Amino acid sequence: MARVIFVLAQKDFRDEELLHPKQVFEAAGVECKVASTTRECTGMLGARVTADMLLSEVKEKDFNAIVFVGGGGSSIYWNDKTAHSLVNAFYKAGKPTCSICLATGTLANAGVVRGRKVTGWPDTRPLVEKSGGTYTGADVEVDGLLITGKGPHAARAFGKRILEKLG
């Protein structure tokens, strides 16, 4: 059974960007876990989630893919060394490395978007371009192991594309 780890901000993650892909995965039998910097997380629309583990406890070998969830709070990971280390570990291990909305800033700053096509909330465009990536503005973009989504409206399609990559 495939296992996916979602990374949430402690507060102001975008509810649909967690819940919709998670529903897609669970319907297909994929085990989903949540990591954050704290156990209790609150979404921008009021979702309350208890993280299964702290970000510092995530090990690439235990999961088949990583998904950074967007929303206003997700920028806390843009310059987070632990988040960058995880992005690079999953990417180098040949596993889907994913972000949606503002969380694309984390992938850009971790250095994995160079020479790649990605999407995210328009605010991430300067970070993507500064990091050598091409910002497309598409709802969902798949370029090799990088799977990125634009925002809440694309969350379900984003989840389906990750599921396809997981096989």
Image: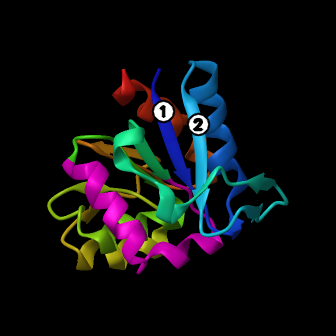
Q: Secondary structure at mark 2?
A: strand
Pointer 2 residue: 32
Q: Is residue 122 above or below residue 94?
A: below
Instruction: Pinpoint residue 76: horizontal percent, then vertical percent.
Output: 54, 78
| Magenta-drawn stretch, dominant element (helix, strand or loop) | helix
Task: Name the image quarter holding residue 25.
Answer: top right
Q: Quadrant of the C terminus?
A: top left
Residue stretch rendered in magenta on the structure: 68-92
Kind of residue sitting beneath label 1: Arg
| Distance CA(mark 1)–CA(mark 2) | 6 Å
Q: Nearer the viewer, residue 152 or 49?
A: 49
State left or right for residue 61 relative to residue 37. left
Q: Residues within 10 Å of mark 1 (few under 14, many from 20)?
A: some
Percent position (x, y) of residue 50?
75, 54
71 in magenta: yes
Which residue is under mark 1? 3
Residue 28 is at least partly visible in this image? yes
Residue appearing at x 36%, y 60% in the figure: 86
Q: Amino acid at mark 2?
A: Cys
Task: Kindly indicate whether the residue at mark 2 contacts the one at mark 1 (C-beta within 8 angstroms).
Answer: yes
